Amino acid sequence: MAAMKNCDTTPLLPYDDALVELTAGLEPLARVERVSLRAALGRVLAATLAAEIDVPAAAMSSMDGYAISTADLAAAGATRLPLSQRIAAGHAPAPLEPGSAARIFTGAPVPAGADAVVMQEQVEADGDWIRFEKRTVAGENVRPAGNDIRRGDTILQAGTRLRPQDVGLAASVGLGELPVYAPIRVGIFFTGDELIEPGQPLGPGKIYDSNRYTIDGLLRAAGCEVVDLGLVGDTLAATEAAMRDAASRADLVVTSGGVSVGEEDHVRIALERQGELRLWRLNIKPGKPLAYGRVDGTAFIGLPGNPVSVFATFCLFVVPVIQVLQGRAWRKPFALPLIADFDWPHPDSRREFLRARLDDGAGEARVQIFPNQDSGVLTSTVWADGFVEIGENQTVARGDRVNYLPFAQFF
């Protein structure tokens, strides 16, 4: 693809088109490893898993009580039966003697010959005999074999990012290890002579490098391995060298700043010189300048420099790229239609993503926006729990329905 010209007249790419371009041609990384269940949390499953056993493996009691055969119920009035055995969880019972009952506990296997369990609260116990009037039906308080999972059932699909309940499900069918994709390696570096590390004295004209820690945290939350090349000299030569170094050591490179049209914005130019620039200016707010391309076959994303723009564009555009590389089933971020508890009377030609949060204090969920939507106000991302998506040239009046995108889906 020919390099894009260094001019500010490049057409703005619509949001949906940018998502297609970012994910087109990407393939999951082929590195697969087997890890223990304890190490599997947050990893991406590399193969679809099927159960090799039934769960439960045998009929189990769902209550503390007495296992009986409904064929032994009295035709009328109370039923009185002798106790023939005691069955605790983890013990293999003998078949139920005809005309008897078995004391049984929750999770214990139901003996052959029994087809129901009477709750202990409904039974009068008298030594080695029980008496009850409950009209019990076959299957009552019994979990049949395979009630949860049948042998051969698919339990987890390839591409699943494993949650605690997923790991627990794998454990329930006896799997001690799982095949997962190795974490993708993401190289990061940052340009800007004005940046200094937190903890150092803040000199004239300097600012603390918050973007480095925002991006690092977002990548780790997404399950990535971070290769941090640190601060790079604010020159084209230093930027090009860092770009080549990062591309040689990582599966994806992410930077912030240096992608606009200023004389000190070197990242976009370096990308054109060292690789290919596939998209640049997006029709969104915040985050219009975003450079995406490849360096020596490695995907590269240069985010804007403003802190809110970094956060927003990472969620909206970097996360889909990571998901594809991880082998996950990528989908466009989902939106919830909620009532706006704000006015937005000034339309913009770009699609806007306002920092917002839910307010369900009035019964029906409503969404508020942070009062200062400037792209340099990082506090808005801490206050908020999602974005409100405002379409191009759209206004909003209090009470309108708006699309709310929870942050949780990105993390």
Image (cartoon, rainbow, N blue to C red):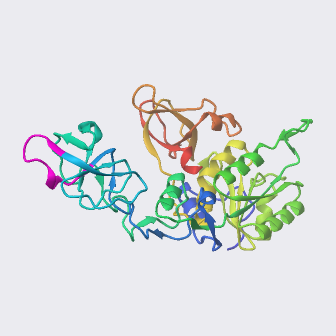
Residue 70: say if magenta: yes
* Rendered image quadrant of residue 408: top right
* Rendered image quadrant of residue 39: bottom right
Which residue is drawn at the image coordinates 41% and 57% (left, top)?
91
Q: Which residues are magenta?
A: 67-80
Which residue is drawn at the image coordinates 40% and 28% (left, top)?
363
Q: Position of residue 202 (x, y in %)?
A: 89, 35
Residue 410: say if magenta: no
Q: Please, which residue is most extreme toward the top here? A: 362
Q: Position of residue 150 (x, y in %)?
A: 36, 66
Q: Please, which residue is most extreme toward the front here? A: 127
| Vertical placement of residue 382 versus 69, above or below | above
Which residue is drawn at the image coordinates 80% and 65% (left, top)?
246
Quadrant containing the N terminus in the rendered view:
bottom right
Which residue is drawn at the image coordinates 55% and 41% (left, top)?
386
Which of 220/149 is in front?
Answer: 149
Residue 23 appears left or right of 67: right
Which of 278/345 is in front?
Answer: 278
- Can residue 12 be spotted in the picture? no
| Vertical placement of residue 288 versus 57, above or below | above
Residue 244 appears left or right of 376: right
Q: Position of residue 404 (x, y in %)?
A: 49, 42
Q: Please, which residue is most extreme toward the left here? A: 76
Q: Position of residue 249 (x, y in %)?
A: 78, 68
